[in-house]
Image (cartoon, rainbow, N blue to C red):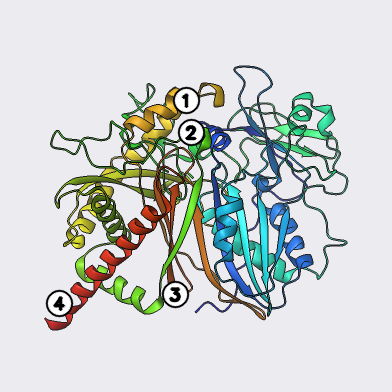
Amino acid sequence: MNDAVPAPRPAAVSGPVALSRELSPGERWYWIIDQLSTLNVCARVRVEGDVSVARLRAGLAALAARHPQLRAAILAPATPGGGPRFVPTTRPIPLREVHLGDLQPDRWVSEVDAREFTESVDWAGGPLARAVVISHPGQVHDLILTVPHVIADGTTALALLRQWVRLAHDSPTTPAGLDTPTSPAGLDTPTAQDTPAASAELEGSAERDGSAGPVGPVGPVGSAVRVGPVGVVGSGGEGGGGGGVVEGFEPFEALFPEPFRLGAVSGHDDGPDPGDGPDPGDGPGPGAGTGGGAGGGGGVDDGGGGVAGRLVPEVFVPFAQRRTRVLHRSIGAGDLRRLVGVCKQQGATLHGVLAAALACAVARDAGAVPGAPFAVGSPLSLREELSRPVGQDEAGCFVSALHSVVDQRPDDLWTMARFIKDDLATRRKAGEQYGVFHLLAAQGPAGVADSEPFIRYFEENGPFNFFVSNIGRFDFPDTAGTWRMSQAQFVGGISVVGYFGSSVTTSHGRLAWNFTYIDRAVAADRAERIADTALALLHDATTTAAGAAGGS
């Protein structure tokens, strides 16, 4: 049991700082597809105790002070050929309140399904986050933090939520008198009206709260601009006073190991084999939020000259009409302990057997015969292999994904699980997880207007269109003073890069397996059948293996 909330990681940059830089190729991809179909990542936790809205708002203000991404908006290019860029905003993270007259344990699911996955975060006005508190009778609260995939993966979303709880608990009972992190005293920052392009973007903003919107000091990709009492103090690069890239705000791609940096690998400049498509891990990925192809045609070679199976949509839903829906499932403490124990006995990973179970469930839905190959996507957190350590508490999207073509055998999930484990390890060692970012840099769309051919390519030829995004065990505290926390988990949207996904979190002694699907392309009853079949196959495989081990 975790008895105390760990102190959040200190901000990499201290003092009143506003930062700006151009979006990287991966970030630009997430930004583009979010405009077609919402691409958010949500983190949720239940908090029991005397939780006030004033403390929650103060905690959000303190959270924004720690992360440049939470004090930012995105400024669309004013002219063709320009790139979108992060610019500072003075708006606070909005908090929506939901008050219930009775206990509704799954109300958070419907809030994510109906609101958080249907409405994009207001990227034009900022900031790049929003929050919800659902208050039940008896001092029971569900907290939801929503962030766009352009700045967050599932680990980031949960880590930000964990920090928010800690900062809210430690804050004064009212935010009055606190230093406002997004508008520090003495910060002489130009208003939105001083930047015509920013002003034009604000006119269409969803939320108008009277505070200043994005403002626009500029710097190239990979640099950050620091804004101080007299405006721009310096920018990264030669001659700038900013000292180069600010740690914690540099592009993800700038942290790639040297052999895989953009432009560093021969043959990657023209784009890699797109067989690893967009990233499903922690959300739909670049080819992060996930996903990869679609159901109609194409697909990935099964290794024997055939085409690996994928989930076939019931109808083609135009990209701009796609909506992610949510199904919540979980595995309790006792069953989880048994599952983890059997995985160790079988030489398999938990992720491997979850991916195997989902592949078999999709295959059964398709009426496939045992042994037929299916392609399942898997997330890869790259935090531990980048050029500098990236901890959980650092905001950003640090994921990629690979797929595995596995012969589905519902009576032998463990052989499938071991294959998936070994296959991912081999391909990861070869650096295949970096290929999609080279493709985006070389051939990715510049904006929504020219995105359809690229998106349609993945729709028709992507390697997978269903996936398991498992962030593993996430240590979320059980208590903060008198507050009690439970059921921490994340769920990521799909947008236009897949048809069926799942987000897996192990925390507070339980495994949350949240399934997602594209409305109309997959009927609700079909989605429930696939999800429940995966859980049933997993349960049967675990029970059989545990029984065999007990009898040996």
Give the foreground label among 3 and 1: 1
Which label was assigned to residue 548? 4
Q: Earlier in the sequence, mark 4 or mark 1?
A: 1
Give the foreground label among 4 and 2: 2
Is 128 drawn above or below residue 442 in the view shown? below
Residue 189, position in %: x, y?
Answer: 83, 37
Residue 222, position in %: x, y?
Answer: 58, 33
Mark 3 is surrounded, within 10 Å at the Cα level, by few (under 14), some (14 to 19) or many (20 or more) other residues, namely some
Residue type, label 2 = Phe
Residue placed most toward the observer, 348 or 394 = 348
Q: Earlier in the sequence, mark 2 or mark 1?
A: 2
The quarter of the displayed image where residue 478 is located: bottom right
Callout count: 4
Give the foreground label among 4 and 1: 1
Q: Which residue is under mark 3?
A: 509
Which label was assigned to residue 452? 1
The quarter of the displayed image where residue 135 is located: bottom right
User: Which residue lies at the image location 59% right of the left edge and 17% below the top edge?
Assistant: 81
User: Which residue lies at the image location 41% right of the left edge and 45% below the top edge?
Assistant: 280
Q: Earlier in the sequence, mark 4 or mark 3?
A: 3
Distance from Cα at disc 2 to Cα at disc 1: 9 Å
Q: Which residue is under mark 2?
A: 319
Pick the quarter of the image with the C terminus. bottom left
Q: Earlier in the sequence, mark 2 or mark 3?
A: 2
Which label was assigned to residue 93? none
Q: Secondary structure at mark 4?
A: helix
Distance from Cα at disc 2 to Cα at disc 3: 38 Å
